[in-house]
Amino acid sequence: MSENTGHARRRAGAVAATVLAAGLLAGGFAASAHGQEEPPAGTAQEETLRDLADQRGVFMGTALASHRLGEAQYAETASAEFNSVTHENDLKWEAVQPQRGQYSWAGADRVVDFAEANGQDVHGHTLVWHSQLPSWVSGGGFTADELLAVMDDHISTTMGRYAGRIDTWDVVNEPIGDDARFRDSVFHRTLGEDFVAESLRMARAADPAAELYINDYSIDGVNAKSDAYYDLVVDLLDQGVPLDGIGFQSHLIVGQVPASMRQNIERFTDLGLKVRITELDIRMNVPASQADLERQADDYREVVTTCLEVDGCTGVTVWGVTDAYSWVPDHFDGQGAALPIDESYQPKPAYWAVHEALGGTPGPQPTDPPTEEPTDPAGDCEAEYRVTNQWPNGFQAEVTVTAGRDLDGWTVTWDFGGGERVGHAWNASVSSSGSAVTAVNAVHNARVAAGRSTSFGLTGTHEGTVSAPQPVCTGT
Ligand code: 9MR
């Protein structure tokens, strides 16, 4: 890719981050008219998931459908939020070689071109899979030698076309079934278990520089199926078969992130393999309850944090840009809402959980109903400053503004005592002059009724001390 092109597209794509941030500023996760507006001038722009992943040197990916790339919001969100893409369907055998020897690259190329124009990596999905396999292969009646030739042609042609442009591949997808035994397929029936090793050898020959993976679902925790994979990959490595990693698809159900996920990732990375989370989504019954959305956020946080904490777990791809186009509702009756961005391209609690796990802000917290009688401060308003998190060079704080009378706007000022500097802020416009900081309400939280509260947040840097400033609040 060209650096310049990538950079230019990157800025254009940041529109989506603005939409997401503005959705947040509009006061919630639901779609709202404000969702299309620019945030108030001076409001700090939230970093996107992509920004944060880039800073950490990990991938944060999504699955793309070529036929959606003409939709501006889809394309802008995909480029702003993700630094890696996987073809959701366009690179599968039935799409690429529907008839023997007749290759069809339009959809696959479109996704690769999009990724290159946006400076994104592409993960190749997938080469040898029992599903979405054209009937000329599955019902072809090939001998072992013939089938090997058919596989070699498909692998070498497909990987060869994208050599240098697609650097990682799911060479074999889902070879083991839910019963932890090799799945019945034309490949297994004709070639036995060796079809996996053969596919990997062909892939290495097709593009020696590419990283080669086996990919499957329901192998996220330690269980009979992941044990079977463990045995398989130990065997492959013992035989010297080229294999670089294993993909955990991670199609999960809310509240069911396996407790042994970390241990499971580590046993594969201990073998010298990489682990990728390749297709993460976390489904629930719909319409989604707030409690499930919060639980889902915890689950997303756990998966992303677990991956980031293990050396050799290289990143996370979520299986789609928006709930509007997720595969889940079509395959699981009454379920959906599985992705971090909702059907209206608004960030869900899961989005902010991933944001936070990647080192960003946690986004807006749900407003708890008041549990006590509202306080009634003297004067216009009072502000309470609370440090909510801190780390070696940084900190996060929340400031609560409580109105003493009905306010049409408010300003909070304070002085940092310890050399702190504000980095990002949300739900207020924050500016600094030396150690003096001024925070002015955002549009959506300007009005505060007497006795009620609103809050804003910020992250910043420090030089060793995180002080507890005394903020002063003035109402307008
Ligand atoms: O998301 C894909 C969906 O659009 C297709 O209809 C489906 C058909 O098999 O495949 C989905 O993607 C699958 C992926 O390629 C492999 N792992 C499971 C994914 C979800 O089914």
Image (tube, rainbow, N blue to C red):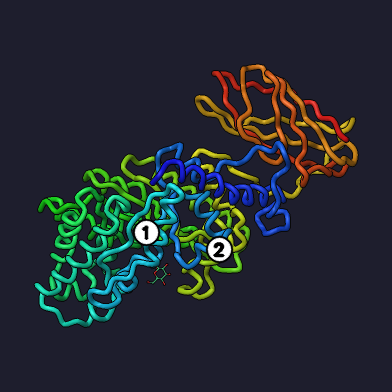
The residue wearing badge 1 is 249
Q: Which is nearer the eye, 333 or 143? A: 143
Residues at discs 2 and 1 in contact (Cβ within 8 Å): no
Q: Position of residue 329 (x, y in %)?
A: 51, 71
Q: Which is nearer the eye, 24 or 77? A: 77
Is 68 above or below relative to 141? above
- Label 1: which secondary element: loop
Q: Is mark 1 within 8 Å of ligand 1?
A: yes
Kindly tell me whether residue 264 is visible in this rendering: no
Q: Dividing the picture into quarters, in which one does residue 235 lie?
A: bottom left
State the CA–CA distance, disc 2 to disc 1. 26 Å
Label 1 packing within 10 angstroms: few (<14), some (14-19), many (20+): many
Left or right: residue 412 versus residue 336 is: right
Q: Position of residue 390 (x, y in %)?
A: 55, 29
Kindly tell me whether residue 223 is visible in this rendering: yes
Q: Position of residue 89 (x, y in %)?
A: 39, 67
Is 120 above or below relative to 138? above
Left or right: residue 51 versus residue 126 is: right
Residue drawn 58% across the image and 54% down it: 294
Q: Position of residue 425 (x, y in %)?
A: 65, 36
Is 464 above or below relative to 24? above
Q: Is mark 2 within 8 Å of ligand 1?
A: no
Image mark for residue 71: 2
Q: Amino acid at mark 1?
A: Gln
Residue drawn 32% across the image and 53% down it: 166
Sequence-wise first label, 2 or 1: 2
- Foreground: disc 2 or disc 1: 2
Q: Amino acid at mark 2?
A: Glu
Label 2 packing within 10 angstroms: few (<14), some (14-19), many (20+): few
